[in-house]
Image (cartoon, rainbow, N blue to C red):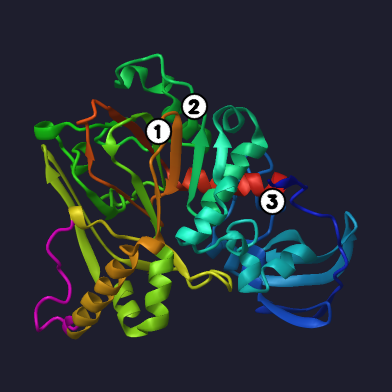
Amino acid sequence: MLRRLPYRQIRFSSTLSVVKHTNKEVTLAINDKEVTFKNVFLRDSCRSPDSVDPISSQRLFTTSEGAKNLEINSSSVETTNGEPALKIQWNNNGKTINSSYPVSFLEKYSTPSGRRVEKFFDSDRKLWDKAEIEANLESLQIDYNDIMNKEESFFQACYNLNKYGLTFVNNIPHPELTEMNEANATQWPAYKIADKFGYIKKTFYGTLFDVKNQKEKAVNIAYTNTFLPLHMDLLYYESPPGLQLLHAIQNSTLGGENIFCDSFLAAENIRKVDPKAYEALTKIPITYHYDHNNEYYYFKRPVIIEDKEVGAGFPKISVLNYAPPFQGPFEIGIEKSDPNYELFDDFVRGLDMFETFINQPENHYQIKMKEGSCVIFENRRTLHSRNEFSDSNNGDRWLMGTYVDGDSFRSKLRVGYRKFRN
């Protein structure tokens, strides 16, 4: 379990001095290491009342305004709240602006890894396969009453999702309602859990959606009893959801086990084994569409979208995109005059490697969801699937799902890190 600690520990051991400044840049010595910042960056980062409204915290100037006719009248180092700080008096378009930059801010922005602090938590993320999840399964379990009422338990869920892209909520009371509709959506446990993370992403499936065997009426393969291959949801949206929740209300049929897989592990394997195929997966986009039931959605995106600033020890990946049931015809690299024509062969090889890897049982975590449990997973990292099921034993299968906006989840994660640290 996470132990409670203040996120910002007060320690100002760094030393700071001004080496020189010009009307283009400022060179500082931070712990005897020279760092040079552009003046435009420093002026742009000013938090003085002249620059940022103290009530709304919104900026009062544009970058181009701050860069225009910018000069330094004076620079010095003073101690503010026990911390060394760079003080600069600017002449900006004939207006005098006094700015202060704590050494902690200057250190943070002097390195790529520092700039991710408090925004992303790379060192706490981990690739996983079946063995990894099973060895750490206990830490992924959270009680419903705890996640709803205890800040630390809610942060544990956020922490798990950042680490593995997967967590579980247990002991959910059985709903008193028997039929879901938009009017009563807020009364269901799936909604209440999702609402803790932030904005629920309503789609054409509704605020919530029932995953049941609808047979001939099904608008999605998930609403049948057939095998559902590994995939991600709503990749035909410009902004797919960040989290998906599935609450098992009834789950007594034969089969129907849920399967999860870490797509980042698969991508990293390809990068190590066949870098050319990996590169192709970052460049050739797949077309995703939903053209059914009087709805027509369309978007195209590559399998792998990278983030080169991710810290050492974790793949430099932002999100994955993989949803074969909703693929449309390819549009890039398919015709010989296309400059990506040869690259398309590398892409096909990479996609085959990806599918081979994710379909190996040792890379799956498979679970028959208990009634009264809910799985939460990152939609752009954790692939999900479901085995075929049968109600020949007179069992019932009813999962209720919903989506959460990824930005609101990451906001909760960042705020949680300010209160709790591992």
Q: Is residue 335 magenta?
A: yes
The answer to which of 290 and 387 lies nearer the viewer is 387
Give the residue number, with chain letter if any, for mark 3: 50
Residue 199, position as x, y percentages in the image: 45, 36
Give the residue number, with chain letter if any, for mark 1: 247
Label 2, label 1: how many angstroms apart (C-alpha)?
9 Å
Look at the magenta stretch and give its main secondary structure.
loop
Asked which secondary structure carries label 2, the reply is: loop
Q: Nearer the viewer, mark 2 or mark 3?
A: 2
Magenta range: 327-341
The answer to which of 278 and 15 lies nearer the viewer is 278
- The answer to which image quadrant residue 56 occupies is top right
Give the residue number, with chain letter if any, for mark 2: 172
Asked which secondary structure carries label 3, the reply is: loop
In the rendered structure, which amino acid carries the disc numbered 1?
A: His
For the point 45% across and 42% down, the residue is 376
Q: Which disc number belongs to residue 30? A: none
The answer to which of 37 and 390 lies nearer the viewer is 390
Q: On screen, 399 above or below 317?
A: above
Q: Earlier in the sequence, mark 1 or mark 3?
A: 3
Left or right: where does residue 366 sit relative to residue 25? Answer: left
Can residue 380 be seen in the rendering of this structure?
Answer: no
Whether tag 2 and tag 1 are in contact, CB under 8 A, the answer is yes
